[in-house]
Image (cartoon, coloured by chain):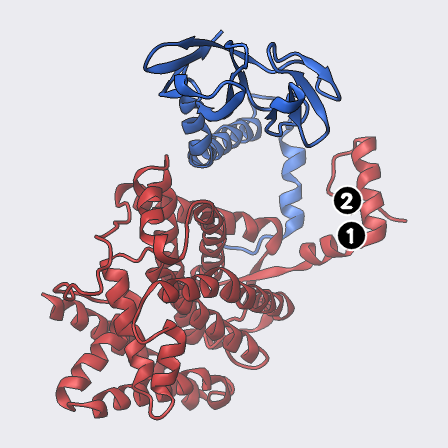
Chain colours: A red, B blue
Amino acid sequence: MPKSSSPVPDIPLLRTAWDYADERLGLGEVMALAAKKTVPQHKHSFWYYWGGISLFFFLVQCVTGVLLLVYYRPGPEAYESVRAITYDIEFGWLVRSAHSWSANLMVFSIFVHMFSVFFMKAYRKPREFGWWSGLGLLGLAMIFGFSGYLLPMDELAFFATKVGLEIPATMPVVGEFIGNMVRGGPDVNANTIQRFFALHVVILPALFIPLLMFHLWLVQRHGNAVPPGEEKKPASERRSIPFFPNFMAKDLAMWLLALNVLALLASLYPWQLGPEADPLAPAPVGIHPEWYFMSQFQVLKVLGEWFPGLTGEILGLAIFTGGGLLWALIPLFDTGSRFEQRARIATWIGFFALAAIAITTIWGYAALE
Amino acid sequence: MHDEAISSEQYETFDDIESTDDPLSRRGFVKLGMMLVGTAYAGAIGYPVYRYLATPVTRAAGASAVTEVALPDAQSLEAGSAMMFRFGTRPSMLIHHTDGSWACFDAVCTHLGCTVQFEPQKNRIYCACHGGVYDMKTGDAVAGPPPRGLKVYVVEVSDAEVVVSRA
């Protein structure tokens, strides 16, 4: 049997171990596949790193999340246990800070990844399922963020969750029922923490990880997409680099950079813990959700002012649903670079979405003052 | 990096250009540097994680460092009976014998760590897990699997309290 692709040094014992595993697992085929895999190289190649960066932050979430699980207690003791993690347990503040910062950085890099995929038109055939699974992962990541935000049960967590759950409650007919079921009662309480905890550490990972595997498998299957402009070039003008080790080394360098950014943020700006939530206390002034919900928050606030009563909220929900649907269905609408017009329309949709999110987010923060 | 496409074959030739054996070669230097930096990162992540996980262990070690425990009102313990208390973190047993003497032991069986019990009617200390038997006055292992006797503490009885300390 040819053993030329063995990556282990020529030491008899290692060689035997490799051959043993290779014969049974077909590792040589994997190595051959990895050796053949290439990554396109062009002026937009920088954006290829953002999926990997998102993955890196997700791995950090897994590790720091398990570490927090060692001391965190859901239910009525939630606040006390997070207080102990933050102030009593050695380096607990750092673990918690890394988890919170990495969560935000993960959502941020998923957004960058999504928009870069959008503008490179990487959702086109045959990569539609990559786009849809990616949107699914973004949705799950946001639910991860929303459910994780409540778990310390400090003042901000309490009100953010309270307000956030009022939004599905405005849905006609089923809204109140859904709100009560998610909360485990008519108000945010210890039951809500327990439910969100189950969601955050069991249900969401159980959905997220297989979907992520599917997403990564698709990337492996179809390779990196190149933007239409690059696609038009003759094959002789297109450049690529081997995935292994060249692109992987660059990918790892980006991970190292991401780790450094995370370490700086987590240690220089430790995540704060507010006072314990008091259901009888009034909402603190300037209360607002996490930045990645700010856009929706502001739209609902403004629509509520323009269209008082339920009308504003229902209108807001309709806008989000319609916009989200249009966004998700773009691969069906923009079917190929053959239709230059359509590709250009898609680009404008992308700019519009980016601008709308950016403007409403900035507006939201400005309105807090 | 050059603008032209780079194939994996070209990269492999670097092995021939520079030998990894020479520690002063560019490649050897980079390798050593990477190893040092890698170790520094592993330490910078590993150390806080270790301290984080070890916090309760360190705290317990602090608590078990006590050398003396005062048991207020324990002098009135009825003769022929025993009381359990915590010496640092460990369950311990104070016995007031019918002849008026006192004894105090670490109540953790030396076999596999179960907590032992005083059996006054049988004049012995017994471990229910695997049937270990200890002498109720000296703590010596008498029967069953225990490899050695229970740890003995020094007892001082006064009018107000009983003070137990390490031997």
User: Residue A32: x and y, percent?
Assistant: 74, 55
Mark 1 and mark 2 on one chain? yes
Q: Position of residue A276 (x, y in %)?
A: 24, 54
Q: Which quadrant of the view contains residue A368?
A: bottom left
Badge 1: how crowded within 10 Å, few (<14), some, or many (20+)?
many
Q: Do we see residue A270 in this rendering?
A: yes
Q: Position of residue B53 (x, y in %)?
A: 46, 36
Q: Which residue is mark 1?
A: A28
The quarter of the picture where residue B5 lies is bottom right
- Residue furthest right in the image: A1
* The quadrant where residue A181 appears: bottom left
Q: Is any part of residue B47 visible from this angle?
A: no
- Pinpoint residue A274: horizontal percent, then vertical percent: 22, 52
- Dot 2 amino acid type: Ser
Please indicate whether residue A176 sits to the left or right of residue B48 in the image: left
- Height in image: A78 above or below A230? above
Q: Residue pushed farthest left?
A: A369
Amino acid type at mark 1: Gly
Earlier-in-chain disc, 1 versus 2: 2
Front residue of B166/A135: it is: B166
**With respect to residue A92, does B137 lie above or below?**
above
A354 lies left or right of B152: left
Labelled pair 1, 2 in contact (Cβ < 8 Å): yes
Between the C-alphas of marks 1 and 2, the distance is 7 Å
Check disc 1 and report its element: helix, strand or loop.
helix
Q: Residue at x 54, y 55 (%)?
A: B4
Mark 2 — residue?
A: A6
Q: Chain of mark 2?
A: A
Label 2 crowd bin: few (<14), some (14–19), many (20+), radius 10 Å: some
